[in-house]
Amino acid sequence: MSSVSTTTAERAASAAPPAEAPGSRVGALLRVPTLGPLGALLLACLYFSFASDRFLTGGNLSLVLQQVMVVGTLAVGQSAIILTAGIDLSNGAVMAFGSIVMTKLAVAGGLPAWLAIAAGIGVCALFGAVNGSLVTLAKLPPFIVTLGTLNIAMALTHITSKEQTVTGLPTVLTKLGDTFPLGQTRVTYGSVLMLALFAVAWYVLRHTAAGRHLYAVGDNPDAVRLAGVDVRRQLITVYTIAGALYGVAALLLVARTGVGDPQAGQTENLDSITAVVLGGISLFGGRGSIVGALYGALLVGVIRNGLQLTGVDSVYQILITGILVIAAVAVDQLARRRRK
C-alpha cells in the first residue's frame, strides 16, 4: 500500500507543472504581445486626462470612438494582410472609391440604397482580389502592387465623382452614424460594428484552422506549402476579404461625414498601418494579435484627439505619429533579434 501511494505521488509530481520563479512569471507576462499596446494606451489616456479637462468626458470618449471606427475597420483588413508578411498601401484610396461608388449609385444612379452599398463593397473586394492575384500569381511585391492600385483607385475616384462631393444621400447610407445612449454618453452604431468586426477577426485567427494557416503563411510559407495548404488561394482570399472590409469602412465613412467625398482616404492608409504596428503586429508577418491592433487603433485616435484638445498643430500630430511608428518597428526588430 505504501509503495502504491509513493508511486502515485511520484506520478503526480512528475505530471504537475514545474513551479515558476517570480522572475520567470514577470518574463512571461512581458512576452504577452498585447501588454505593450495596452500599457501605451493607458499611459496616453492618463497623460491627456491631466493635460485637458475635457478628455475624460463621455462626449469626448464617444468622439474618439467615432474617429477611430473608420481606421479601426481598415486596420482589421490591414492586420490580416500584414500577418501574411504583406502590406496594403491602397486601402485608403480603395475605401474612398467604394464610398463614391455607393453614393453615386444611390443618388445619381437611382439604385436602392442596399444595392448601392453592396456594389460599393463589391468594388472594394474586387480591388482586394486583384491585389492578391498580382501578389501570388504574378509574384509581384505587395508594396509595388498596392502602390499601383492606390493610384488607380484614386484616379477612378476623381473620374467617377468629377471632383464633386456627393450629397443628398438616402438615410440608409448614413444609418450607422446614428447614436444610442450608453450611460451618460451616446455611441454610434458604426463604433459597435467596428468592435464586432474585431471580435470576429479575433475568433477566426485564434480558434479556426484558417486563422492558424494565416499565421503560418506569414511565418514560413514554404513549410505551409509542404504541409498541403494552398498558399496562393489563402493569400487571394485574405486580400479579397480585406478589400470587402475596406468597403465596410467606406460605408462607415459615408455614415460619419454624411457625404461622398472624393478627397477622403488620403491619410487613412498610413493611419491603419500605424495602428497595426503600434498594436504589436510584426511587419515581417506571422506574429501579433488582432486585439493589439484594436489597442493600436484606439491609441492613434487618443493621441490625435488629445493633441487636438491641447492645441497642438496638425503638422506636429503627424510628426509625433511618425516617431511612434519608427519606435514600434524598432522594438519589433529588437524582439526578432532576441528570438534568433
Image (cartoon, helix red, strand yellow):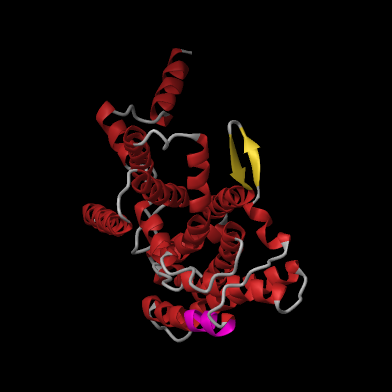
> Looking at this view, is 22 or 291 the one in front?
291
Horizontal placement of 299 versus 73: left or right?
Answer: left
Query: Can residue 158 be found in the magenta stretch?
Result: yes
Above-or-below relation of 21 to 302: above
State the image coordinates of residue 99 (x, y, percent, origin top left): 59, 70
> Where the C terminus falls, by quadrant?
bottom left
Q: Which residues are magenta?
A: 153-160
Horizontal placement of 233 versus 218: left or right?
Answer: right
The residue sitting at 64% across, 49% down in the picture is 189
State the image coordinates of residue 187 (x, y, percent, origin top left): 59, 43
Horizontal placement of 28 versus 122: left or right?
Answer: left
State the image coordinates of residue 60 (x, y, percent, origin top left): 48, 41
Query: Can residue 217 be found in the magenta stretch?
Result: no
Q: Main secondary structure of the magenta part?
A: helix
Is there any visible trace of residue 58 in the rendered image? yes
Above-or-below relation of 89 to 176: below
Is there any visible trace of residue 230 in the rendered image? no
Above-or-below relation of 74 to 240: above
Image quadrant of residue 270? bottom left
State the image coordinates of residue 32 (x, y, percent, origin top left): 37, 42
